[in-house]
Image (cartoon, rainbow, N blue to C red):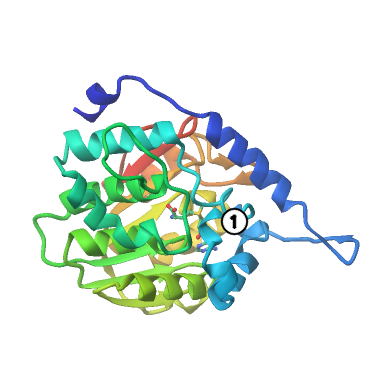
Amino acid sequence: MIRALLGNYKNQTTSVLQRIHTRLLRVGFKNGKRVNFGSKSASAKTFYPELALRAAIDPSIYSVFRRHHLYTPILEHVSLKDASLYLNIIKDVYHLADDEIYQATEPLQCIGSPYKIHLDRLRMPISTTSLRYLKVALEIKDKLKDGPSPDLVEIGCGYGGQAVVLDRIMHINSYTFIDLWQVNYLIQRFIEDAGINCKYRLATLGSLDGLGSWDMVISNYAFSELPQSLQLKYFDQVLSLSRRGYLIMNSGVDGKFDDINNLPQDSLLKLIPGSSITDEIPVTFSENYLLEW
Ligand SMILES: C[S@@+](CC[C@H](N)C(=O)[O-])C[C@H]1O[C@@H](n2cnc3c(N)ncnc32)[C@H](O)[C@@H]1O
């Protein structure tokens, strides 16, 4: 149904530019010397974690972080064309009216001053990224509709926008945010400001041991960017302890995000019992896919 609505549309220009920008941002210098970032995820290799931390503690940065030129290559870069496709799905598959769309994404329209655009099918200007979070949230709600209020865990949460939208459209028992420690400060500030309703906790991979099990793990454009060694740790400590999974992967069939070696598709399918792969819809970069179980 969704594919029929979209045809075979692929919009990759914006993503290519973002990858080039992200690559340039990684070339860091301190006191005239090249900074060695070691074996980390793509976003952890940039100045992004420090910027997130500064945004969390400095009101003047926080008030505009979602339009900051160093922040938008990592997040807040959904193109106008992709936004229209997300909106088509939200309206034609899930039948949400303009007011319901606004209600579900309301905190994401103002906190951090995102750019907002006009779309033909929507009365008010809207943050394009909020439409992606809403489309994903509707799919996750649908997958979990037969169970009790779920315990959710997310790996690589940005500023927590996905959780905020999910929390506004369904009842969640608990939400565990796992990100870099610097980024967790920004997530906490953002979700507190947005007024999240569910119980939550923030963790890093290192602080996870014994935190328990979950009904679903979510990780969009995040687990897929991690090097294999970290992915296997996340498999042991989170994926294998999650009954279901919803992961948008931007590491291609062979497991390569830029210069990082990630787990290829066939290894992931062998590792995770009951897992399957479909296209990301809409496809935002060549070979992106959705890994679910
Ligand atoms: C490209 S962003 C995606 C954010 C969000 N999932 C979204 O859909 O907008 C990647 C996220 O992964 C996080 N990240 C980087 N290294 C990580 C690690 N080792 N463990 C957990 N999260 C990490 C980054 O801080 C960032 O929040």
Q: Quadrant of residue 265?
A: top left
x, y percent for residue 127: 40, 48
Query: Which quarter of the rendered picture does the N terminus lie within?
Result: top left
Going 40% across and 34% down the picture, which residue do you hit? 82
Q: Position of residue 120 (x, y in %)?
A: 31, 31
Q: Residue at x 28, y 65 (%)?
A: 152
Q: Is residue 102 visible?
A: yes
What element does badge 1 sit on? loop
Return the residue at label 1: 68
Q: Residues within 10 Å of mark 1 (few under 14, many from 20)?
A: some
| Observer-nearest of 70 and 175 | 70
Task: Say whether residue 30 is left or right of residue 198.
Answer: right
Residue displayed at 46% across by 37% down = 79
**Quadrant housing residue 43:** bottom right
- Residue 280, compared with residue 216, is above or below; it is above
Residue 85 vs residue 10, the one in the foreground: 85
Q: Residue at x 28, y 38 (%)?
A: 87
Residue type, numbered disc 1 = His
